Image (tube, rainbow, N blue to C red):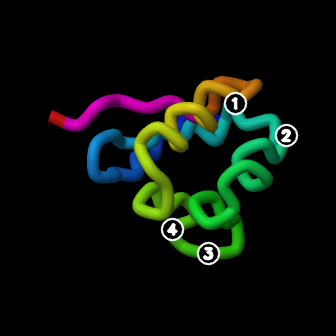
Amino acid sequence: MEKKVIRYKGADITVIWQPHLCQHAGICTKTLPKVYNPEARPWIKPEFATTEELISQIDACPSGALTYEYNE
């Protein structure tokens, strides 16, 4: 299985999603539904939340499929 790493750049951070780790707990879609919409493309839109909201939600991801890095 290919281990993809997909990046979604926001204003201050880039959200990193590793689909092979995702357990589909749904915490992301329940916490920030405007950011995480599996029916939309792209399905992650970091511009719809503050950096603090994104970091808080990403830190709550139980599988570690979502991480982030600060933009330079």
- N-terminal-most mark, 1 or 4: 4
- N-terminal-most mark, 2 or 4: 2
Residues tagged 1 and 2 counted as in contact (Cβ below 8 A):
yes
Dot 3 lies on which element? loop
Q: Nearer the observer, disc 1 or disc 3?
A: 1
Horizontal relation, residue 25 to residue 71: left or right: right
- Kindly identify the amino acid type of the residue bearing the numbered disc 3: Ala
For the point 58% across and 32% down, the residue is: 56
- Kindly identify the amino acid type of the residue bearing the numbered disc 2: Ala
Q: Which mark is residue 51?
A: none
The Cα–Cα distance between marks 1 and 4, rounded to whole angstroms, is: 19 Å
Residues tagged 4 and 3 counted as in contact (Cβ below 8 A):
yes
**45 in relation to 25, above or below:** below
Dot 4 lies on which element? loop
- N-terminal-most mark, 1 or 3: 3
Residue 53: x and y in percent read 54, 42
Horizontal relation, residue 65 to residue 51: left or right: right
**How packed is label 4: few (under 14 Cα within 10 Å), some, or many (20 or more)?**
few
**47 in relation to 21, above or below:** below
Q: Which residue is mark 3?
A: 40
Residue 57: x and y in percent read 63, 37
Range of residues picked out in magenta: 66-71
The Cα–Cα distance between marks 2 and 3, rounded to whole angstroms, is: 18 Å
Quadrant placement of the N terminus: top right
Q: Which residue is mark 2?
A: 25
Residue 2: x and y in percent read 57, 37
